Amino acid sequence: MDINPEIDLSAVATTLASQGRVQIHDFASAESAKALHDLLKQHDDWYLSYNEGPDNFETSEAEFAALTMEQKHRFTAGIYRRARSGFQYLFKQYYISQAVNSGENQGHPMHAVQEWVTGENFLGLMRYVTGRDDIRTSDSYASLYGPGHFLTRHDDRHPTHHRIAAWVLSMTPEWDENWGGHLAFYDEAGNVVEAFKPAFNSLNLFTVPQHHAVQLITPFAGAPRTSYLGWLLA
């Protein structure tokens, strides 16, 4: 996986320092971007990720498909009910770094992403643009948001992991802004101060903590919102 050598890293660092977030278009080389996108299109081992209060859960697509229609409706109604008044999320993911570390699905082509984001080319660039030499490593996920999926407002703080910044490599071509799914950033009053539309081969990088959300994917969205993401860890 190669990073686009034409990125103006000094400008990226300046924007990140002043605003706390930056969007880098054409982050990977054209060949690498195509390979990364192909991995997402071919991937068929997604897990439905959701929470109930502070507890996180994953359900395989086969397990969810085995539920009755009534059970599916009850599950979704519970998700939306909890989202009215608290932190809630619902989307599909594949936790790449966990699979690599636990030896699951050995040889899976998507595991090359973890090797890439823990390599010196990626981490060295991240240290430069963030100005944080204490960045030690990164984890990685693949995510897929379909109609009805969302992630409500939160700030990415973790009780045991020292997260310096978050990165989201958006790999969603030809997205219509009316389909939702924007990575939205909020001020203390709850106003959206900036929102990044799903795009192809754009890296969204932002410091932690910072209030943000992934807005609801509309029922009429014509494609899934796909990306790779992770946190830069000290």
Image (cartoon, grey):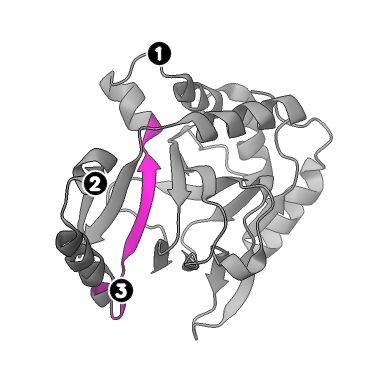
| Residue 123 visible here | no
Residue type at numbered disc 3 = Ala
Q: Where's residue 140, x and y in %?
A: 44, 36
Residue on which disc 3 sits:
83
Judge depth for marks 1 and 2 and give the one in front.
2
Please state the extent of the stretch shown in magenta in the rendering.
82-96
Which residue is at the front of the view, 39 or 233?
39
Neighbourhood count class around disc 1 (C-alpha, 10 Å): few under 14, some 14–19, many 20 upward:
few
Please tell me whether mark 2 sits on a helix, a strand or a loop: helix
- For badge 1, the amino acid type reads Gly
Q: Circle 1 — which element?
A: loop
- The residue at the point 75 percent across, 41 percent down is 26
The structure residue drawn at horizontal position 64% and vertical position 23%, both measured from the top left corner, is 1
- Residue 123 is drawn in which quadrant? top right
Q: CA distance from mark 3 to mark 2?
A: 23 Å
Residue shown at 48%/57% (left/top)? 208
Q: Amino acid at mark 2?
A: Ala
Residue 19 got which mark?
none
Identify the residue under disc 1.
Answer: 107
Cα–Cα span, label 1 and label 2: 27 Å
Nearest to viewer (mark 3 / mark 2): 2
